[in-house]
Amino acid sequence: MNRRYLIRPRADRDLDDQADYYGTRGSPALGHRFLLAAHETFTLLASQPEIGWWPKFKNPALAAARAFRVRGFERILVIYRPVEDGVDILRVIHGSRNLQALLSREGLE
C-alpha cells in the first residue's frame, strides 16, 4: 500500500519561508538541503505516522496532531495529522515558537 503525505497550504508557505531564510542567511545550497530533508521527513512520517509525539495541544481540533523534527534541522518541527493513507502536513515551524499560541491564533491551514 502506498502511503502519501499532503502538504497543507500553510505548511507549504512555512516551507518556502524556512528555505528562503536558510538560503539567504546561509546559502542557496543550505535552503535546498532543508527542502530535501523536509520531504524525506514527510516520506518517513507517511510510512510511520505514529512515530511522532503528541504535543498535547489544548485546542480539541488538534487532538490527533503529532510533532516530529526534520532530520538535520532538529529545531524545525513538522506538525502533522495521521490519516488513513498517510499524513497531512499541517505546519513546519521552528520549535522555539509558542506552538499553542501560534496554532490557536493562525489556525491549521
Image (spheres, grey):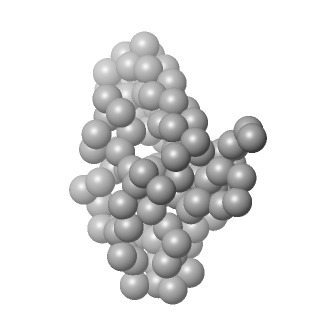
Q: Residue furthest left?
A: 96
Count of numbered tags? 0
Determine the residue positioned at 52% across, 46% down: 48
Q: Quadrant of the N terminus?
A: top right
Taking depth in this image into account, of 13 and 65 the one nearest to the observer is 65
Determine the residue positioned at 30% across, 67% down: 98
The spot of residue 25 in percent (x, y) is: 32, 26
Q: In the image, is residue 86 above or below residue 58?
A: above
From the viewer's perspective, is 86 left or right of 74?
right
Q: Residue furthest top?
A: 29
Evaluate whether residue 2 shows in this view: yes
Determine the residue positioned at 35% across, 33% down: 71
Q: Quadrant of the C terminus?
A: bottom right
Taking depth in this image into account, of 106 and 88 the one nearest to the observer is 88
Q: Quadrant of residue 3?
A: top right
The spot of residue 59 in percent (x, y) is: 47, 84
Determine the residue positioned at 65% across, 50% down: 86
Evaluate whether residue 13 shows in this view: no
From the viewer's perspective, is 3 left or right of 29?
right
Q: In the image, is residue 24 above or below residue 73?
A: above
From the viewer's perspective, is 10 left or right of 104?
right
Taking depth in this image into account, of 60 and 31 the one nearest to the observer is 60
Q: In the image, is residue 93 above or below residue 41?
A: below
The spot of residue 47 in percent (x, y) is: 58, 42
The spot of residue 97 in percent (x, y) is: 30, 60
Q: Residue furthest front?
A: 1
